[in-house]
Image: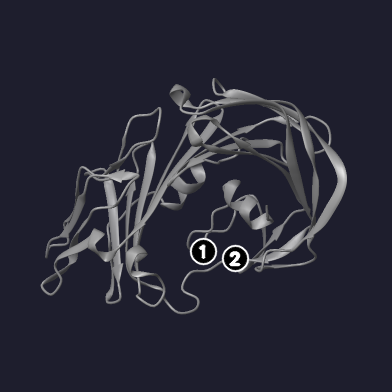
Amino acid sequence: MTLWRFLRVAGVVFVGSMVPASFAAAAPKHYIASSGHVTEVQLRGSNGYQLQVFADYRHVVTVVARRGGLMTEYSVRGTENGKYGVKARLSGLGSVQFRFVPNGRQHRATAPPWCEGPGGWLLEGVVRGRIRFTGEDGYTQVAVKRAKAEVETWPRRRCRVLEPGRGPRKWTASFEAFREVPPNVLFLVKRYAKRFRPSSRRVVFQMYAGFSRGPVHILRTASAAASVSSLVFLDPKSAPENFTVAPPPPFSGTATFQRTPESVFAWEGDLSVQFPGVAPIALAGPAFHASFCALRGCVSQSSSISSDAVITSGAKRAR
């Protein structure tokens, strides 16, 4: 695992020009990433799920359950249990309690390309204790007392804020629908230029839903790629901002975006995504605020809440 992979899992998702809230800004276009470490354990859950357990230097535990295009992250604050170890309870979903035992093997880890400074270290070993997790309605389960593990450590670094719009534009159209009413939901569509993606995967669909259940912060994500036939413009010449989306699984249903000459937006349909153990998540309706961008420009509805919030809310850290 690399540091930038951990930053995403830890909730530091770079969307637009958002600066990670957990880092202090050193300059308008830079921030200081403090030194730290993260322990990673990879496990195999029931029903074909891949599970990862992360424990960071702030004693925040994140359990990631993934299968196909669906992924759910569960994060909670724990307590220290020896160097690189942790104790945490996931409020009805299980518990994590382990110590890290190194085996003496270690490797250099390179710094992220947007950071200045030396690399860190990857330490191999095992965790001993107990990892017990059961997803909602038992969609996946795991219970182990010992597992292979890896710890990545890194020093304090000065890093560049990732800004949008640098380099050639790869997409020709993008759409965003955001629901302010909790649980917050963000649905994204991007159509890429022919030269950047194969024809069968030129349109990318993504969904993020973030909320809290007691002390546990949950982030659900879904993604799929399809051909341009999944994004149909109703009348490209007279109404280039009106279109219908029909994503492949794990999504189901369709939705239509329409903008009248008076700039009244409508995002309607039965588009949804089903996660195991929970009710289907609707991705269209009057509660959503929409924005659409193409090479000619952008149109958007006003919204009092930034859509960045939904992506980070699932992995928001207890303070």
Element type where label 2 sits in the image: loop
Cα distance between the residues tagged 1 and 2: 7 Å
Could you tell me which residue is drawn at 42 percent across and 47 percent down?
69
- Residue labelled with disc 2: 161
Local packing at callout 2 (Cα closer than 10 Å; few below 14, some 14-19, many 20+) is many
Q: Is residue 114 left or right of residue 65?
A: right
The amino acid type found where label 2 is placed reads Val
Q: Secondary structure at mark 1?
A: loop
225 or 99: nearer the eye? 225
Q: Position of residue 59 (x, y in %)?
A: 71, 36
Q: Is residue 90 visible?
A: no
Q: In terms of image quadrants, where is residue 115?
A: bottom right
The residue beneath circle 1 is 17
Q: Please state the horizontal and vertical placement of residue 71, each as a whole percent of the image.
A: 48, 42
Vertical relation: 224 (above or below) 131: below
- Identify the residue shown where x is 60% and y is 65%: 161
In the image, 47: left or right of 157? left
Q: Nearer the viewer, residue 26 or 148?
A: 148
- Viewport quadrant of the C terminus: top right
Q: Give the percent coordinates (x, y) of residue 269.
A: 19, 46
- Quick check: 240 above or below 98? below
Q: x, y percentage for residue 152?
A: 75, 50
Q: Are marks 1 and 2 in contact (CB under 8 Å)?
A: yes
Return the disc, 1 or 2, that comes first in the chain's sequence: 1
How packed is label 1: few (under 14 Cα within 10 Å), some, or many (20 or more)?
Answer: few
> Which amino acid type is marked by label 1?
Ser
The residue nearer to you, when weighing 313 against 153, is 153
**Disc number placed over residue 289 in the picture, else none:** none
Furthest toward the top, the residue is 92
Q: Residue at x 34, y 38 (%)?
A: 181
Q: Residue at x 21, y 42 (%)?
A: 270
